[in-house]
Amino acid sequence: MEEGKLEDLISSLPLEIQRRVVSLLPLKEAVRTSILSTFWRSLWSPVQLSLDFDPNPVNHEGSGPSGQEIEQVMGMFLKSFACPEKLELNLKVLNNIIEELIVKATKGIEQELHVEFLETQNVPSITSLCLHNNPTQNASFFGVKLLHLRSVTNLSKPLVSMLFSNCNVLESLRLEKCRGLESLEVETHNSLQRLVVEECSGMAAIVISAPNLISFEYHGALPQMEIKKTVSLVNVVLDLRDGPGRNELDCQDVLPILASFKDVEVLTISSWLLEWLCLAGVIFGRLEFKFNELKELTCTDSIISKDKRDSLACFLNSCPSLTKLSIEIESKLDLIPNPCFHQYWHEPHLWMDFTTVKSNTSDLKQLRSVELEGFTGKEDELLLMDLILEKATRLNSFTLV
């Protein structure tokens, strides 16, 4: 059959069948069809739907579709084509004031799902996201393994929580730029192995209960954090470059967070948190827990000062198995000012002179590799190098960048 007639024949078919034809082609060949004509290009355009969304689970007469109906729409989209596709939902939330919410969903080559929420108007910042595992194999998103959420704010919250609580085999969850999100609760996702939270500037509280979680990364201001049943954690990143946020530092709140990470093997942490704890009188060697399994430690900050140097030395006393130490100085980071503490746990460790600090620092018998990045040769940096070289007698590698 001639190429033009074949195209005319395919063009006469219903859109669903047209997309099915394209889906049967190898991915590279299917993408190449977009250059043949505007018809072929249109097959790769996002599927667009306009709906009125009532956040309440029950659909009342006169209101828009319920959350369950939207779940069915998106579920049909996920199951309709084998090839990568895009879905765009234009939702109008019926909440006395009509607000528009655009949901963009993309199926990836490896069967992952990427969802982006875009709102046309500003909304209140107070909101929460709860993902409670409620396994139902008939749910549209039961088989989702990777979930990347962006811009989840007040309008998106009920839809997101409703859609993705049934992700019973979810392995990776990433929240990015959810600036209106103040709290996150993830519980009983037994398959969840990786959780990343970044650029969520309003985040104030996180509750995680995921027994098989292996990797946890948090980038932002220090939130209230409760980590439960995470017995499999190996890698943790606490990038607290935005400081304490709206929280006042309370050792009773922060030390349980560190205790929940005591069995990790790889830890990245902002040095200012260690400094603040030492200023409050915390002496890591006297705590009830140690980081006995910790093999790799990375500390980040904008500068190495006397207090940061000595607080790091204090923290090393709780890391008997450390094999690799990395210290990264990023001058572009904001300097986090020290608070004034009126009560102390113990005699503040940072009141000691450097000679006493060095003598009280444990020998780093397992340490084999040290990387110092961003050092400028200032006195406190040189003293820290001297302490490390004296205590780590079995070093194989010392890198200064």
Image: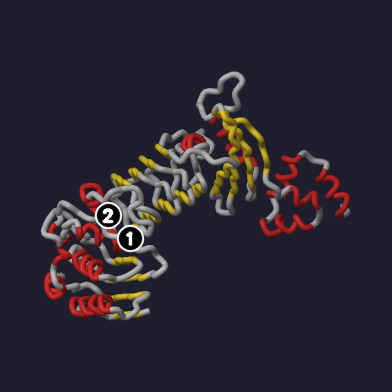
Q: Residue at x 75, y 52 (%)?
A: 41
Q: Is residue 212 visible?
A: no
To which quarter of the image does residue 308 belong?
A: bottom left
Which color scheme did the rendering employ for the protein?
A: secondary structure
Numbered circle sitting on residue 350: none
Question: Who's the residue at 15% across and 54% down the image?
Answer: 344
Q: Secondary structure at mark 2?
A: loop
Residue 227 shows up from this direction: yes
**At which x and y percent is residue 311?**
22, 65
Answer whether labels 1 and 2 touch (C-beta < 8 Å).
Answer: no
Q: Amino acid at mark 1?
A: Ile
At 84% from the left and 45% from the top, the residue drawn is: 9
Tag 1 residue: 336
Q: Nearer the viewer, residue 221 or 159?
A: 221
Q: Secondary structure at mark 1?
A: loop
Q: Is residue 215 above or below residue 62?
A: below
User: Image height check: is 232 above or below 371?
Assistant: above
Locate residue 68, reporting x and y percent.
Answer: 54, 30
Observer-nearest of 299 and 174: 299
The residue carrying pointer 2 sits among few (fewer than 14), some (14 to 19) or many (20 or more) residues within 10 Å by Cα, namely: many
- The amino acid on which the numbered mark 2 sits, given as a three-letter code, is Phe
The disc placed on residue 261 is 2
Quadrant of the rendering where the C terminus is positioned: bottom left
Q: Residues within 10 Å of mark 1 (few under 14, many from 20)?
A: some
The residue that appears at 87% across and 52% down in the rendered structure is 4
- Left or right: residue 282 versus residue 113 is left
Image position of 109 (left or right of 296): right
User: Splitting the image into 4 quarters, where does residue 264 fall?
Assistant: bottom left
